[in-house]
Image: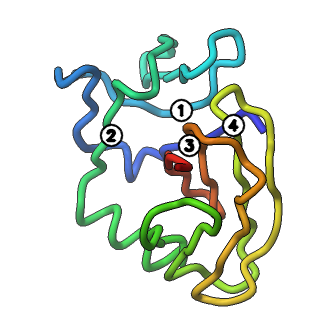
Amino acid sequence: MTMLLAVNSSRAEGVFKVNGEDIQKTPTLIALDHSRAGCILVQFSDSSVVSYNMNLVEYYPNEVNAIQSAMTEGTFFRIKGHVRDVLHLEGITPGAEIGIYAANGVQKYLGKADGKNTSVDVSRLSQGVYILRVGRQAVKFIKE
């Protein structure tokens, strides 16, 4: 899977920062950069595309739109506790697709949520940075 996060125009307003500095362009697509490990490609509304180290990027969508969208789409969730052997997720729509990807974009897990609170065995994953995708929402997490 290449796409991590598609930001439609109703949710594009917000704060986009790289290395703590505000970027004045509006992101429309955030995807893994398969040519550079640990990096993401960001496409902006002016069609420009820039590669960034994923550890330096922050995106805070307009809070009202993000909360309304999450409630409408049922994709608002959170990771509970440290991630060692089991990834505990809360607030997932039952049946939502769950994917875990290594920083280089390789899929490590694909499954479906069995309930609002779902656990995924990640004991076989090595320590490092991973991308968790639930439905259309994606977040970075660190496996200890």
Q: CA distance from mark 2 to mark 1?
A: 10 Å
Q: What numbered label is drawn on residue 110?
A: none
Q: What numbered label is drawn on residue 102?
A: 4
User: Which residue carries the number 3 mark?
Assistant: 6
Q: Residues within 10 Å of mark 2 (few under 14, many from 20)?
A: some
Type of amino acid under label 4? Ala
Marks counted in the figure total 4
Q: CA distance from mark 3 to mark 1?
A: 6 Å
Q: Residues within 10 Å of mark 3 (few under 14, many from 20)?
A: some
User: Which residue carries the number 2 mark?
Assistant: 59
Type of amino acid under label 1? Ile
Is mark 3 in CB contact (under 8 Å) with mark 4?
no
Type of amino acid under label 2? Tyr
Type of amino acid under label 3? Ala
Q: Nearer the viewer, mark 4 or mark 1?
A: 4
Quadrant of the image occupied by residue 123: bottom right
Quadrant of the image occupied by residue 57: top left
In the picture shown, does residue 121 fall above or below 55? Answer: below
Image quarter hosting the N terminus:
top right
In the picture shown, does residue 125 fall above or below 51? Answer: below
Is mark 2 in CB contact (under 8 Å) with mark 4?
no
Residue shown at 30% from the left, 49% from the top: 61
Secondary element at tag 4: strand
User: Which residue carries the number 1 mark?
Assistant: 30
Disc on the earlier residue, 2 or 1: 1
Q: Nearer the viewer, mark 3 or mark 4?
A: 4
Q: CA distance from mark 3 to mark 4?
A: 19 Å
Q: Nearer the viewer, mark 2 or mark 3?
A: 2
Is mark 2 in CB contact (under 8 Å) with mark 1?
yes
Disc on the earlier residue, 2 or 3: 3
